[in-house]
Image: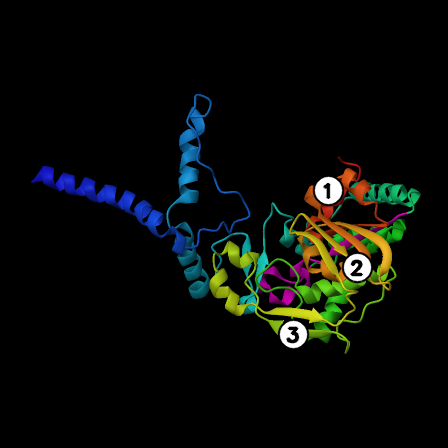
Amino acid sequence: MKKTAVRIYVAAFLMILCLPWLFWGLFKGYFDSENHENRKLKERPSLTAETYETFFKDYEEYYNDNIPFRNPLISLNTGLDYFLFKTSSNQNVIIGKDNWLFYNDEDDGDPIASYWGENLFTEEELQQIAENCIHIRDELKSMGKEFVLFIAPNKERIYSEMLPKKYGEPAEMYAALQLVEYLRENTDIRVVYPYAELMQAKKELPGCIIYNKTDTHWNFVGGYVGARALLGELGISMPEVDSDLISIREKKLEAGDLAGLLNQKRILTKMERGFSLSGYDTHNLDVLQAEQFFAVVFRSEAQNADPRKIYINGDSFLTYMERVIGSQFNSAYMRHKDFYSYDIFQEKDPDIFVYETVERHVDGLLTFNFWQE
């Protein structure tokens, strides 16, 4: 009897271990298996003489990252936390008011430290950034080209009232504003920081939001406001976002990257609000290349489009501005900053070079090398 009981226990244990993998192999296609995390999942390690000491730890991490039904299980856990307790099971996501989500990753720009003004530049760092920008500006000027710096405000700063009360009011002085004021007071670098324009648009469009509720980015309305500010600096006039020329319509939109970090995209999509914007002159815009997060190329052959060629070195915030900006030039090239190279810049030979960055990554100007290969 004891031997039989042991065999039953062993068989049950093996079934518990094996059945999930069996069912996963059969029904994997019916479940979500997408990677919703801002990291690469662990790959299966190989056991060699060199990896022996770390193999078991690495394999445990691999197993945890690839366990059957991982996403549905995570989704169940995060769903219980979110909908029952209004808490976040992901330390990088803050649950705000009215289903607003905010980003809180200390290793990715630390937006909350930026919100609180805890990551201010030293005088030496401000001077270093200024010297870097002046060096780039002078190099471009010697070629007959223009240089503009564009900084997109963090979502937390524009919608601070939607953060939980414990985060308090945003700091009056913070790194992005500190840099903007320093450059304007001590250099003639052209800086565009559309905080005031965004806050005005938010006020003038009470039935519309300008940043996505479940994403880290602004939406196409906020992107238009930012693009309009940049184009204005370049001498191109665009209609006010609240003018009769501009049409803004609400549309369905999939939940964003923060909802993905909570594994709740399907449900939170019902709570997201998307908007489309039209009414400005697109100059018969033609998209020649569109590789998201890599490079986007626009062309307009309209005679009334700006004849200058523009190159924008930017981040994902550029995605929501690119069509508006691209529509105003005969030639526009936009490349993600992670893939910048001076060789490509020379090949494109633009008349205007724009460095675009979101507020939380403004310190990238400390190390940006315009001449890097």
| First of labels 1, 3 by sequence position | 3
Q: How is the image coloured?
A: rainbow
169 in magenta: yes
Quadrant where the image shows the N terminus: top left
Q: From the image, tell me which residue sits under label 3.
A: 249
Q: Is residue 122 something one can see in this rendering?
A: yes
Indicate left or right for 150 with 80 as reference. Answer: right
Q: Residue 331 location, x and y as percent? A: 80, 54
Looking at this view, is 236 or 163 the one in front? Answer: 236
Residue 340: numbered disc: 1
* CB contact under 8 Å: marks 1 and 3: no
| First of labels 3, 2 by sequence position | 3
Q: What's the CA distance linking mark 2 and mark 1?
A: 24 Å
- Outermost residue on the top side: it is 49
The magenta stretch is: 145-170
Residue 147: numbered disc: none
Identify which amino acid the numbered label 2 is placed on: Ser
